[in-house]
Amino acid sequence: MDPELEPFVPLLPRVDLTDPVAERKIFAEMAAAAPPWDTSTLEVEDRTVPAEPDVAVRIYRPQQARGAVVWLRGGGFVFGDLDTDRPWAGRIAEGSGAVVISVGYRRSPENRFPAALDDACAALAWVAGHAAELGVEPDRIAVAGHSAGAGLAAAVALRTRDRQGPPIRFQLLNEPGLDDRQETWSQRNFTDTPWHDRGTLTQVWRHYLGSQPATPYAAPARAADLSGLPPAYIATAELDPLRDEAVDYAMRLLRSGVSVELHQWPGTFHGSQAILSAEVSQRQVAGICGALRRALAD
């Protein structure tokens, strides 16, 4: 493990999704205790996307933005909200120079698949239809996310391709959860890693799917055809059960003719880029922002 990250590991709470409501409270308290993220350089606005049901979004506008990013938070589909995700969304808006639309998608297990995907797709359609109002060009829209949100972003790209939805210029998948089968080497061997291990991910999929069989729109690694998808930036953490399924997905995209930038960050664990004092975390965040900035530029 990276020596700058290792001292923080004993301070991290163990994620236990047996009681989703309790875990949400713990996560919200931890997020509230962190130093507030300064968004004074951004215009921040809450809006509602008309849908069934309506979807809450929070818009982060930097000056002279050229493109838009539909941003999908992490949290195992279970915890997190627009407030806890403010630091992530604010950093990406500042670093990428894009308008970031953080999506308050519904959480499981109260709202199982495809509720979160429906909300994300509704938000994408709304952004495409309101591009002029947002001050961006309709052909400069990316979908992006972290962890479960990255898996959702991949699913949005798949469904949008299949249903001929709004054009997506780029997909950014940071430490994505893509495969409910948990059969990769990293899934089978990382049973005691920080933040996420095999056991917590088993709970994640159980809450998200319930008794439903997984489809490619729930677990994008199950998709047989990855051709025609947007160019991708995929980032993985070395000590993360999700590592190998993300690397496999990147390779399959490449073999399907999709342009991919793949980063495997050594010595990191799932979500460790939240430890901003570490040099490797700063490089991870800069990599995400730089990829979006390049993708949405001329």
Image (cartoon, rainbow, N blue to C red):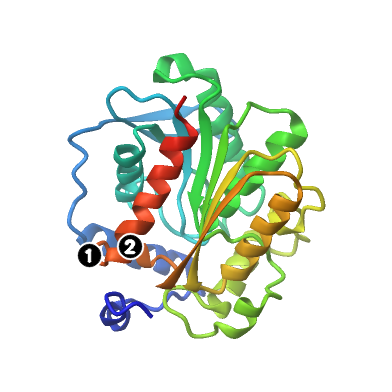
Residue 295 - label: none
Determine if residue 275 is in view: no
User: Is the residue under label 2 in contact with that under label 1 (CB below 8 Å)?
Assistant: yes
Residue 226, position in %: x, y? Answer: 75, 47
Q: Is 20 or 130 nearer to us in this picture?
A: 130
Can you name the residue that lies furthest to the right here?
Answer: 224
* Label 1 sits on residue: 277
Residue 212, position in %: x, y? Answer: 76, 60
CA gap, disc 1 to disc 2? 7 Å
Above or below, 77 against 183 in this view is: above
Above or below, 40 against 202 in this view is: above
Residue 70, position in %: x, y? Answer: 49, 37
As helix, strand or loop, the secondary structure at mark 2 comes to helix
Q: Is 22 or 96 nearer to us in this picture?
A: 96
**Image quadrant in which the N terminus is located:** bottom left
> For the residue carrying disc 2, how many other residues have a C-alpha within 10 Å: few (<14), some (14-19), or many (20+)?
many
Name the residue: 38% across, 32% down: 98
As helix, strand or loop, the secondary structure at mark 1 comes to loop
Name the residue: 60% across, 77% down: 186
Amino acid on which the number 1 mark rests in the picture:
Ser
Residue 44, position in %: x, y? Answer: 28, 32
Dividing the picture into quarters, in which one does residue 59 lie?
top left
Name the residue: 45% across, 40% down: 292
Above or below, 137 against 274 in this view is: above
The reply, left or right, for residue 51 in relation to residue 86 is: right
The reply, left or right, for residue 228 in relation to residue 297 is: right
Dividing the picture into quarters, in which one does residue 3 lie?
bottom left
> For the residue carrying disc 1, how many other residues have a C-alpha within 10 Å: few (<14), some (14-19), or many (20+)?
few
* Label 2 sits on residue: 281
